[in-house]
């Protein structure tokens, strides 16, 4: 495979088993593009780890590289392999997992009672047996549910841990297979780390949700604020991964059972990819620990780290398309999105027809991602969907965003929590992923696909981003300088009292001069009249928000 001349970034949406479509899409994109930045959440985070490892192996010529993605896709497509990745351990977890996947088994007691009635053909005897059986069944179900819930709590609130522990070669459960595949793609003998990727020019960003802090964490994360317990993590990861982490971390001085999570340079990517993919109840949340600074310390003693469960990154952001974004981009950031077929639409045998990409700037500008529902469960699901995806859905309508996303459509029987999909369905999804990759590759780079001309090319994208960025710059400049020109701000710059966040020695006078220059420049700036005319719509806006990508240390 010849080295591509073009570069791109790539972000992938979460979707549990829907992620099986990603490897083939990445393989097609990799024929024309070198991946510089790769990001994702949930199943998209696992796929992002694969493509980052593959690009690393391609550059180092040590692993199977980009072509190895097809092998990973073929493994998922083989009969039974997908469902075998998800295994419950322990009687009650196995029982709960079985009933969760096949709830129709719950009608067996009713069928048994019906059969007894037919056998005895005695009304009074049948009623007594039915009553006794119903009471026994009720007590059994209540006790069983309680035991399943207790087992879930011990297991990180997931039926499946994703690993058998020990060596990654012992069992093909999800995390063991993830680790093995990452190592094969990269060619590294030791667990592949964020630092390895950075040294080769590959920027991997993954999102996971800290449930105890109530917010997303984006890795790499270098705040030196998280801890872990070795023996505890060995239940969720292959032994060689934890052994490697132990060699790169130090025990806490006061509480030696806790070890500091290695910094990004030494943190295996499989750890965060698995944490991001912790779909609630299906896969266990990953236990890390942090110091609870909201708690009062007794007699000046050091606070003991408390549990922080890290779960599915999609809880907070299921499609972090803001990764790698820049007002004026130097390379495209592609998005691989998963959507449901709308009413009246059915999957086509021609997978090219199951994938969409806008051909013009106006396409999808009025598009809404509908969440249709009926009944109370659907109503509650729609509430969660809106809370989870409102930001992502709004972003995908914006000019300069919608043109570089390739949504492919999924039927209810495809992807999601369908762990037992037939081989032909999985093969169709693999082909759909390849079709999506080809559409992005061909249409965005060349403007043509199957003799159809596309307006939404890279050059067009640059023009749209220029128009949008210059309008935002003009609006921001006008707003900021109006505030700075007030007397209160001028007085603030001239007084001598300290406020915190002070300038370095000598820089205050420079700041005053630069502020005056900005005000003078803005008074002569005529951009608001020029750049607001014909601006791409819907119009975005600039706003201050926390930087959850860098997430630097707080104030000293």
Image (cartoon, grey):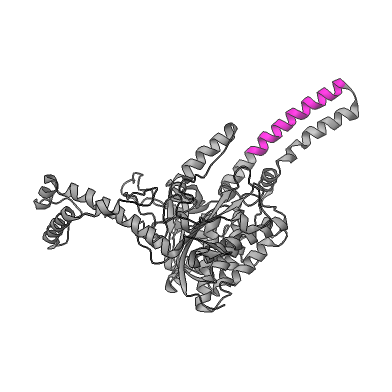
**Along the line of sight, which residue is nearer the eye, 336 or 104?**
336
Q: Nearer the viewer, residue 465 or 252?
A: 465
From the viewer's perspective, tell me whether residue 5 is left or right of residue 135. left
310 or 1, which lies in front? Answer: 1
Label the magenta part by its dominant secondary structure. helix
Q: Please provide percent x and percent y for residue 538.
A: 40, 47
Answer whether residue 132 is magenta in the image.
yes
Determine the residue positioned at 41% across, 60% down.
221
Q: Position of residue 477 (x, y in %)?
A: 23, 53
Residue 34: say if magenta. no
In the image, taking residue 358 as reference, residue 304 lies left or right, namely: left
Residue 538 higher or lower than 441, as above or below? above
The region drawn magenta spans 123-145
Q: Is residue 83 above or below residue 487?
A: below
Q: Is residue 263 visible?
A: no
Which residue corresponds to the image point at 73% horizontal and 38% vertical from the top-left?
106
Residue 23 position by quadrant: bottom right
What is the x, y in percent for residue 299? Answer: 31, 46
Q: Nearer the viewer, residue 275 or 93?
A: 275
- The quadrant the N terminus occupies is bottom right
- Point out residue 207 in the picture as x, y percentages from the top left corner: 46, 55
Q: Which residue reaches farthest top?
A: 124
């Amino acid at each position: 495979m010849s080295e591509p001349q073009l570069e791109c970034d790539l972000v992938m949406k979460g979707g549990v088993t829907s992620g099986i479509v990603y490897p083939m899409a990445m393989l097609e994109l990799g024929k024309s593009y070198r991946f510089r930045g790769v990001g994702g959440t949930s199943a998209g985070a696992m796929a992002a780890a694969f493509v980052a490892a593959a690009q690393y192996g391609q550059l180092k010529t040590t692993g199977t590289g980009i072509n190895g993605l097809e092998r990973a896709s073929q493994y998922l497509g083989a009969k039974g392999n997908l469902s075998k990745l998800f295994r419950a351990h322990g009687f009650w977890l196995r029982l709960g997992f079985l009933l969760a996947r096949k709830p129709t088994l719950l009608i067996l007691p009713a069928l048994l009672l019906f059969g007894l009635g037919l056998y005895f053909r005695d009304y009074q005897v049948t009623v007594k047996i039915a009553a006794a059986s119903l009471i026994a069944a009720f007590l059994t179900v209540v006790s069983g549910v309680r035991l399943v819930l207790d087992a879930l709590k011990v297991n990180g609130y997931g039926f499946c841990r994703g690993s058998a522990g020990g060596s990654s070669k012992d069992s093909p459960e999800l995390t063991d297979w993830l680790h093995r595949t990452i190592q094969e793609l990269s060619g590294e003998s030791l667990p592949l780390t964020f630092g390895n990727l950075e040294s080769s020019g590959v920027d991997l960003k993954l999102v996971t949700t800290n449930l105890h802090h109530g917010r997303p964490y984006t890795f790499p994360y270098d705040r030196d604020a998280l801890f872990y317990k070795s023996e505890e993590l060995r239940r969720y990861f292959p032994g060689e991964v934890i052994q490697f982490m132990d060699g790169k971390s130090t025990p806490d001085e006061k509480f030696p059972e806790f070890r500091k999570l290695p910094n990004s340079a030494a943190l295996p990517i499989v750890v965060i990819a698995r944490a991001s993919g912790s779909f609630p109840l299906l896969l266990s949340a990953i236990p890390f620990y942090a110091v609870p600074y909201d708690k009062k310390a007794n007699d000046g003693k050091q606070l003991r780290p408390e549990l922080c469960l890290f779960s599915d990154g999609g809880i907070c952001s299921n499609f972090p398309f803001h990764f790698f974004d820049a007002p004026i981009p130097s390379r495209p950031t592609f998005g691989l999105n998963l959507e449901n077929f709308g009413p009246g639409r059915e999957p086509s045998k021609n997978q090219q027809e199951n994938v969409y990409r806008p051909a013009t700037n106006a396409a999808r500008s009025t598009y809404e991602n509908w969440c249709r529902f009926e009944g109370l469960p659907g109503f509650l699901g729609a509430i969660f969907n809106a809370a989870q995806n409102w930001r992502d859905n709004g972003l995908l309508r914006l000019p300069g965003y919608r043109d570089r996303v390739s949504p492919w459509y999924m039927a209810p029987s495809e992807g999601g929590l369908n762990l037992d999909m037939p081989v032909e369905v999985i093969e169709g999804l693999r082909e759909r992923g390849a079709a999506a990759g080809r559409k992005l590759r061909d249409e965005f780079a060349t403007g043509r696909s199957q003799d159809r001309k596309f307006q939404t090319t890279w050059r067009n994208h640059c023009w749209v981003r220029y128009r949008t960025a210059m309008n935002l710059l003009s609006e921001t400049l006008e707003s900021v300088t109006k505030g700075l020109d007030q007397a209160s701000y001028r007085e603030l710059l001239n007084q001598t009292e300290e406020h915190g966040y002070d300038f370095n020695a000598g820089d205050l006078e420079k700041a005053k001069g630069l502020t005056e220059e900005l005000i003078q420049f803005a008074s002569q700036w005529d951009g608001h009249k020029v750049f607001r005319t014909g601006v791409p719509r819907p119009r975005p806006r600039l706003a201050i928000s926390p930087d959850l990508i860098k997430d630097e240390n707080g104030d000293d």
